[in-house]
Image (cartoon, rainbow, N blue to C red):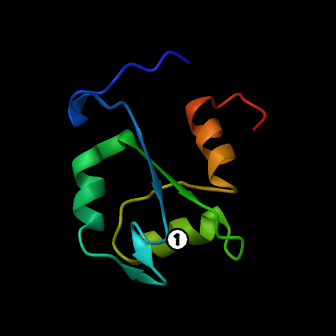
Amino acid sequence: MNAQPVERVADVQAFLVDLDGTLVHGRDLLPGARDLLHWGGDRFAVVSNDAEHTPQQWSQMLRRLGMRYLPVEAGRLPEAAERQINPGSAA
């Protein structure tokens, strides 16, 4: 991968956002989470290493908190990141 330095956030094509501690704490939406996702539009992929809940459960919980539908990628973060960057990979 030939990553170029990003000089401006507007140049970033995508963001991987960890769910717990960034968007939510427990079952509560964190301050600014809604604004962050609104600002980033479709450039976000939400990842979680929470083994207790399925991605579908997290997505449902986020909708109950008033967030737009966000697919949540479960698993260890390096593998989830690889799947988001290269959807056809075996990671």
Amino acid type of the residue that numbered disc 1 sits on in the rendered structure: Gln
Q: Is residue 69 above or below residue 64?
A: above
Mark 1 surroundings: few (<14), some (14-19) or many (≥20) residues within 10 A: some
Quadrant of image for the N terminus: top right
Q: Which element is circle 1 on?
A: helix
Residue 21 at x, y percent in the picture: 44, 72
Residue 34 falls in which quadrant of the image?
Answer: bottom left
Nearest the viewer among 33 and 58 is 33
Residue 57 at x, y percent in the picture: 61, 71
Residue 80 at x, y percent in the picture: 64, 47
Residue 47 falls in which quadrant of the image?
Answer: bottom right
Residue furthest top as drawn: 2
Q: Residue at x 38, y 77 (%)?
A: 65
Residue furthest front as drawn: 5
Residue 9 at x, y percent in the picture: 24, 36
Q: Is residue 61 above or below residue 44?
A: below
Q: Residue at x 70, y 77 (%)?
A: 52
In this rendering, position of residue 83 left or right of residue 66: right
Q: Is residue 1 above or below residue 61?
A: above
In this rendering, position of residue 88 left or right of residue 28: right
Q: Is residue 25 above or below residue 58?
A: below
Residue 24 falls in which quadrant of the image?
Answer: bottom left
Residue furthest bottom as drawn: 27
Quadrant of image for the C terminus: top right
Q: Residue at x 47, y 84 (%)?
A: 27
Mark 1, residue position: 60
Nearest the viewer among 2 and 39 is 2
Q: How many marks?
A: 1
Q: Residue at x 29, y 45 (%)?
A: 41
